[in-house]
Amino acid sequence: VDEQTKIEQAALESDNRNAFGVYLCVNTGLRLGEWLGLQWKDVEWDNKELNIRRTLGRRVAFKDGLPHGTEIHIGDTKTFSSRRRVPITADLTERLLVFKAKQDAVKQAAGPAYKDDDFLLASDLGKHYEPRYYEELFYGLMEQEGGEKGNFHCLRHTFATRCIEAGMDIYVVSKLLGHTNPTTLNRYGHLLPDHRAASIKKLEAYRKRQANTYLFFSFMTSIVHLFCVLF
């Protein structure tokens, strides 16, 4: 948790406004391509949700039927399960509004030179980000905070871990991450025993409440019956 706090703080305090994406991804579990492909029209402010429906990344380009370098590809998410709505907290919503205000200021300063493609993550002239460049930004933040060097995907693992530690259901976590199959989260099995015990305690408390409710109504029924007999 301490390392997560450090990287979040570094992202929020960075001179590079686009470092905010690191904070967003560690709190939503988005894949890098999903973050790069996110547009402002995908932000549902009233519902506090992100509508994940496209991804941006590099893929092999072909010329005359043969591989010819790579090219940026913007398209639908890789699977039906990846297409999803991810709720965001009130705090994250507020920070997202601040991020938007910064981008709007950059857009205004650039004037006609700004090419507005509606991407959350954009250069000072509105151009989309290269995946490699954003990974380098992330590595820079990690190095700055003295953390272990990991790839961008580790932010998803951190998000999943925090969700499970908070007692969230595995199926729900799987849906938030856009997994096709919940068994993908088997790697987090070591986090579950304490939550199983806690769940049994919740069941025990629920059964006790049920029993107490039953006793109360049985008692009240007896009182009413006695009252009817006497009067």
Image (tube, rainbow, N blue to C red):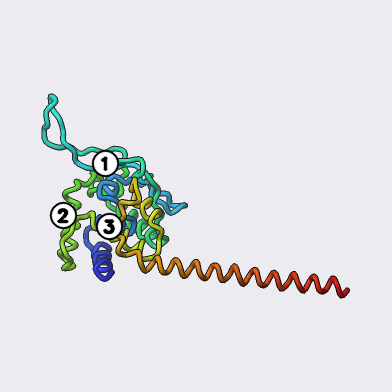
Determine the secondary structure under disc 3: helix
Determine the secondary structure under disc 1: loop
Q: Is residue 6 left or right of residue 27?
A: left
Q: Give the image location of residue 118, x and y in percent.
A: 32, 44
Q: How far apart in space, not on screen, are marks 1 and 3 (Cα)?
A: 42 Å
For label 3, the crowd category at 10 Å Cα-Cα, with few meaning under 14, some 14 to 19 and many 20 or more, is few
Determine the secondary structure under disc 2: helix
Amino acid type of the residue that numbered disc 2 sits on in the rendered structure: Glu
Occupied quadrant, residue 92: bottom left
Q: Nearer the viewer, residue 37 or 97?
A: 37
Q: How far apart in space, not on screen, are marks 2 and 1 (Cα)?
A: 24 Å
Identify residue for label 1.
115
Q: How far apart in space, not on screen, are marks 3 and 2 (Cα)?
A: 27 Å
Picture layout, residue 15 above or below residue 45: below
Question: Which residue is located at x 42 percent, y 69 percent?
Answer: 198
Question: Which residue is located at x 27 percent, y 52 percent?
Answer: 106
Nearer the observer: mark 1 or 3; the answer is: 3
Identify residue for label 3.
187
